[in-house]
Image (cartoon, helix red, strand yellow):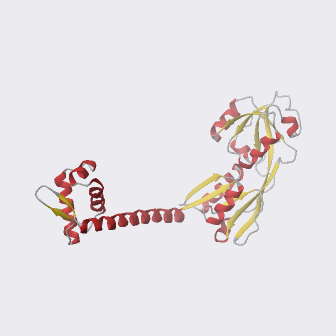
Amino acid sequence: MIELKDLQQLIKIAECGTISRAAEELFLSQPALSRSMQRLEDELGVKLFSRAKNKVELNENGLFFVRTACSILENCDEGVRRLREFDRERNSFSVGSCAPAPMWELVKGLGAELEGRRLSAEIKGVDELVRGLKSGAYKIVIINRPVDEEGIVCREYCREKLLLCLPAEHRLASRKSLTFSDIDGITMLLYEGIGVWHDVSARLPHTRFIVQSGFDDFADLVRQSSLPSFATDFSLDKTDVSNRVVIPVEDDGAEQTFYVCALQAYKNLLPAARAAGQGEKNV
């Protein structure tokens, strides 16, 4: 039976021009490489080399078969790629969202439904998520606008409200609610992966944000720092705010409505709408 390594060695000989140079690059002895080529010739039943007393080189058959060997290896690589892609499609489930907290809730619910499958989730822009849903890159997406297109099932999932978490001694801590103009100008901690909530920063041109890329690092800073930070009624369960005052932001853009969308084949996995206020602590 022809072995792939024999084809790889044949191609290397063609690239190097001689068996001795190919043997050096393959970290083989010249006799060992010569034996491999003789075995390949025996399997094929055709001579690939012209052998003289002090010279061994590929003949016309060998040069022809080098091209065939390249094609075989390329097809083999493509076959492996397609197999891995098939396995990934069959055993993995990709979710995308334009905001983190609704995705956390969705992934938690899907975990039991998809036991044994790899579940991946990432934050992306809305347009990219819709394109990924159509192409099959995502099975379910969460976005902040409805999609009305054939083949896509879309339903309202949740409404998420923005909150400001403050130390009790902060000058704003006694307020019952806040607007963006109240907040603008203070220094705040900010989690980088907040997706569409980044639009809020445009409403706060005078605010200095200290940005953390990892949520665990962000949560640790919130717990240990005296700096204010944003949260939402969904994300409070992920952050220890027991030593802080939590105040709702009542302003345009301080609440987002999210929609969960899937192709028809996965509509049975779409979660029910999340109850308003679910997950809120005392605010």
> As displayed, is residue 210 above or below residue 102?
above
**Number of numbered tags placed on the structure image:** 0
Give the x, y percent position of residue 162. Answer: 80, 45
Give the x, y percent position of residue 160. Answer: 78, 51
Q: In which quarter of the view is residue 268 placed?
A: bottom right
Name the residue: 63% across, 52% down. 122
* Quadrant in the picture for the N terminus: bottom left
Give the x, y percent position of residue 190. Answer: 72, 38
> As displayed, is residue 107 above or below residue 182?
below
240 or 250, nearer to the observer: 250
Q: Residue furthest left?
A: 53
Name the residue: 77% across, 52% down. 278
Q: Residue furthest top?
A: 169
* Quadrant in the picture for the C terminus: top right
Q: Is residue 123 left or right of residue 253?
A: left
Q: In which quarter of the view is residue 258 placed?
A: bottom right
Name the residue: 68% across, 65% down. 262
67 or 248, nearer to the observer: 67
118 or 194, nearer to the observer: 194
Give the x, y percent position of residue 107. Answer: 64, 55
Q: Is residue 70 left or right of residue 43?
A: right
136 or 237, nearer to the observer: 136
